[in-house]
């Protein structure tokens, strides 16, 4: 019975598949393998060329504190890529080694950030960084490969590779308002909060649409005022009367989409609700002009139980420098139901 896959094996397999596609492996009698160079070395009579990926070092990512046991752990992998060409008269095995290795170098140079893959709902996009090897490190690596003679090789760092927990942290709710309460006795410190919480005010702002990567700016318009956070009791008349209207600031007429993320204590944060396609209505968002703002109606993703919902606006554009498609996201709007 085959072993179950892990996030580590899935990412490494995706890198091997990327090279297989770039080298047209099926058409050119090339095998792209994962393992030690000793296990990939061809024997007499083999007719297939081989490219081997040897993941020989695993390191922490070096950014931020160590991950908790229920958080995704991000790692860096060092990978030795070795070519094993076979002789095809009049082309020697050594020349085919260089042809294979040159194709590998070209593939990773042209596309150092690989296509995203989804692993258990987590999107991973490895980055490949060339790592020059000194003679001492080359000797150490090949000294472990038994009687296999050295073959042309290059090393890369693959990052960042996620190690996913079996039971991941769900994530907590967001803070939508702040307040304070003063009590006269110490025994009351454990009683429920009875003060008045106030959401942060919305200030006037202008989206700099001269920048290629400008992101939309949002607010709810309710009662002639701009707010970024609202809170309602489930089943209350205030919730029943709340009909969200969203003001989208940005370059006038540019398409954006509004999308929700929802939270509860059982499943944590996840996508939810309907996506609404709309357009920005101008770069300036001024609370003093809320009554005359052009808004877009949206429906709450739920209203029958306690939880939170966050609304974002996303805009997708093609970066001028290389044509890569980029998605930028607005500030969040929070709906808290208790």
Image: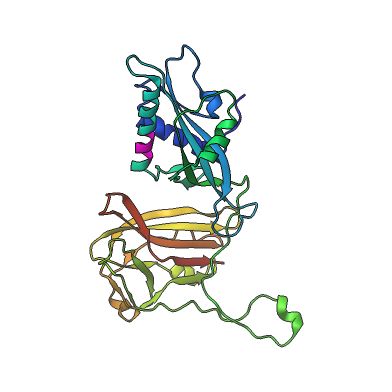
Name the one closer to the observer, 165 or 8: 8
Placement of 258 over or under 116, stated as above or below: below
Magenta highlight: main SS? helix
Which residue, as the protein is rendered here, is positioned at the far bottom? 184
Residue 115 rendering spot, x and y as whole percentages: 39, 42
Residue 312 rendering spot, x and y as whole percentages: 40, 61
* Left or right of residue 197, residue 255 in this image: left
Which residue, as the protein is rendered here, is positioned at the far left? 253
* Left or right of residue 13, residue 318 in this image: left
Residue at horizontal 59 percent and vertical 32 percent from the top: 4
Q: How many marks?
A: 0
Whether the magenta-drawn stretch holds residue 38 is answered as: no
Residue 220 rendering spot, x and y as whole percentages: 39, 70
Q: How is the image coloured?
A: rainbow
Residues in magenta, as a range: 104-108
Residue at horizontal 35 percent and vertical 55 percent from the top: 327
Q: Quadrant of the N terminus?
A: top right
Placement of 253 over or under 50, stated as above or below: below
Name the one closer to the observer, 261 or 93: 93
Residue at horizontal 41 percent and vertical 66 percent from the top: 331
Q: Quadrant of residue 282?
A: bottom left
Residue 295 rendering spot, x and y as whole percentages: 31, 68
Which residue, as the protein is rendered here, is positioned at the far top? 45
Q: Quadrant of residue 55?
A: top right
Q: Quadrant of the C terminus?
A: bottom right
Name the one closer to the observer, 258 or 69: 69
Residue at horizontal 29 percent and vertical 67 percent from the top: 250
Which residue, as the protein is rendered here, is positioned at the far front? 135
């Amino acid at each position: 019975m085959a072993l179950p896959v892990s996030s580590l094996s899935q990412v490494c397999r995706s890198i091997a598949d990327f090279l297989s596609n770039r080298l047209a492996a099926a058409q050119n009698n090339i095998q792209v393998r994962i393992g030690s160079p000793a296990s990939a070395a061809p024997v007499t009579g083999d007719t297939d060329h081989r490219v081997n990926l040897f993941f020989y070092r695993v390191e922490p990512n070096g950014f931020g504190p160590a991950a908790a046991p229920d958080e995704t752990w991000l790692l860096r992998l060092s990978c030795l890529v070795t070519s094993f060409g076979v002789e095809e008269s009049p082309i020697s095995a050594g020349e085919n080694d260089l042809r294979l290795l040159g194709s590998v170098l070209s593939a990773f140079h042209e596309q150092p950030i690989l296509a995203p893959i989804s692993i258990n709902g987590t999107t991973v996009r490895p980055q490949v960084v060339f790592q020059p090897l000194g003679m001492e490190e080359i000797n150490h690596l090949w000294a472990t490969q038994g009687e296999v003679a050295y073959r042309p090789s290059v090393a890369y760092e693959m990052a960042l590779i996620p190690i996913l927990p079996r039971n991941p942290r769900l994530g907590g709710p967001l803070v939508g308002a702040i307040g304070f309460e003063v009590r006269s006795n110490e025994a009351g410190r454990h009683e429920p909060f009875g003060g008045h919480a106030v959401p942060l005010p919305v200030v006037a702002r202008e989206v700099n649409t001269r920048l290629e990567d400008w992101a939309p700016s949002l607010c709810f318009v309710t009662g002639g005022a701009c707010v970024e956070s609202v809170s309602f009791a489930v089943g209350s008349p205030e919730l029943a009367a709340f009909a969200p209207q969203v003001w989208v600031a940005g370059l006038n007429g540019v398409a954006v989409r509004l999308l929700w993320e929802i939270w509860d204590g059982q499943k944590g944060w996840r996508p939810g609700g309907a996506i609404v396609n709309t357009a920005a209505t101008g770069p300036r968002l001024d609370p003093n002009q809320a009554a005359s703002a052009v808004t877009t109606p949206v429906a709450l993703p739920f209203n029958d139980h306690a939880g939170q919902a966050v609304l974002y606006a996303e805009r997708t554009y093609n970066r001028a420098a290389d044509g890569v498609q980029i998605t930028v996201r607005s500030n969040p709007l929070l709906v808290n139901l208790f």
